[in-house]
């Protein structure tokens, strides 16, 4: 007598929904977006490699010339652009490391630690993003003057050591990326909160920290208003040096765009160095979302 247990079990194959392949219009749109995004950089390179009389030529010159290195030498002879590059690297690098460190630390505390007033403090942090930056320029400048930092890089670095966006961004990431069971297992092994942060949370935060680091570096590198207010022309950043080059009676666009091209290189280098982790962080967030 055959029972149900003796009969072979047939497992129906799982049908997966086919992912539609992108069509030609999708590729055409991507190529158009890429061309529109890359053309300003290419145009800066073209102008920076030409002489000043070729800028207003009709039709415009669309092929790079042979005066790039001569124009680069003019930039460094006209202004102290080497000091501007060094100052921007110091400011952007310090702010990036500080924002990533403090944002991951605070984001871990707000996401995984239980303490009184946690939600209220998080609301205060989020509310600070609604305050316009220009509203605090005068009191912030007065504070920097009282500290004796006016004209120094400290005045640019210290106000940007931590950002509300960074704290909120890392808090939202830790809510999903770090399971509570993993932290509980670490506590049962005798780990303190700082050891959990260093050995468990930071390794899990690498993709999001790379994205936050790139955004922070770009924002600090491109910051113009506050360095223009608090720094002196003898101690410039890249953006204030560009403003100095463009502030003459007549603007030499080959000189300005050559300096802008030089100032773009560090940002591209940072993206090339950390591009894999940045793309991985964006894709990981998309998959978890």
Image (spheres, rainbow, N blue to C red):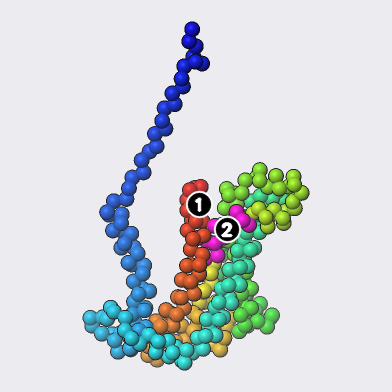
Question: Which residue range is magenta in the image?
Answer: 202-214
128 relative position to 256: left or right: right
Tell me, yes or no, whether the highlighted magenta stretch contains residue 232: no
Residue shown at 60%/54% (left/top)? Answer: 204
User: x, y (%) of residue 182?
Assistant: 66, 46
Residue shown at 52%/85% (left/top)? Answer: 82
Sequence-wise first label, 2 or 1: 2
User: x, y (%) of residue 281?
Assistant: 51, 56
188 relative position to 250: left or right: right
Residue at numbered disc 2:
206
Residue 47: name its quadrant: bottom left
Does the magenta stretch mainly form a helix, a strand or a loop?
helix
| Secondary structure under the numbered disc 1 in the rendered image | helix
Residue 257: name its quadrant: bottom left
Q: Is residue 120 in view from this perspective?
A: no
Residue 35: name its quadrant: bottom left
Q: Is residue 213 in view from this perspective?
A: yes
Label 1: few (<14), some (14–19) or many (≥20) C-alpha neighbours in 10 Å: some
Give the Cα distance between marks 2 and 1: 11 Å
Residue at numbered disc 1:
284
| Secondary structure under the numbered disc 2 in the rendered image | helix
Does 200 appear above or below 18? below
Q: Nearer the viewer, residue 231 or 63?
A: 63
Does 158 appear above or below 250? above
Label 2: few (<14), some (14–19) or many (≥20) C-alpha neighbours in 10 Å: some
137 relative position to 260: left or right: right
């Amino acid at each position: 007598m055959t029972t149900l247990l003796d009969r072979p079990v047939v497992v129906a194959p799982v049908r997966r929904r086919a992912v539609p392949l992108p069509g030609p219009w999708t590729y055409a749109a991507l190529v158009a977006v890429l061309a529109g995004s890359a053309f300003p950089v290419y145009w800066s390179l073209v102008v920076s490699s030409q002489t000043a009389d070729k800028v207003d030529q009709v039709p415009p010159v669309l092929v790079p010339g042979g005066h790039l290195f001569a124009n680069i030498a003019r930039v460094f002879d006209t202004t102290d652009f080497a000091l501007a590059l060094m100052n921007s690297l110091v400011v952007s690098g310090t702010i990036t490391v500080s924002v990533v460190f403090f944002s991951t630390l605070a984001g871990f505390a707000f996401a995984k630690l239980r303490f009184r007033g946690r939600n209220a403090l998080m609301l205060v942090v989020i509310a600070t993003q609604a305050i316009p930056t220009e509203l605090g320029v005068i009191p912030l400048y007065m504070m920097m003057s009282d500290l004796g930092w006016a004209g120094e890089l400290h005045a640019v670095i210290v106000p940007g050591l931590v950002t509300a966006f960074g704290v909120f961004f890392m808090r939202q990431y830790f809510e999903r990326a770090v399971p509570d069971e993993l932290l509980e297992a670490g506590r049962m092994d005798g780990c303190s909160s700082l050891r959990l942060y260093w050995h468990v949370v930071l390794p899990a935060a690498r993709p999001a920290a790379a994205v936050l680091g790139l955004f922070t570096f770009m924002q600090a590198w491109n910051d113009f208003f506050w360095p223009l207010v608090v720094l002196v022309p003898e101690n410039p950043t890249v953006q204030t040096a560009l403003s100095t080059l463009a502030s003459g009676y007549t603007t030499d666009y080959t000189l300005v765009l050559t300096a802008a091209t030089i100032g773009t290189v560090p940002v591209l280098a940072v993206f090339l160095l950390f591009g894999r982790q940045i793309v991985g962080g964006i894709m990981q967030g998309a998959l978890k979302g």
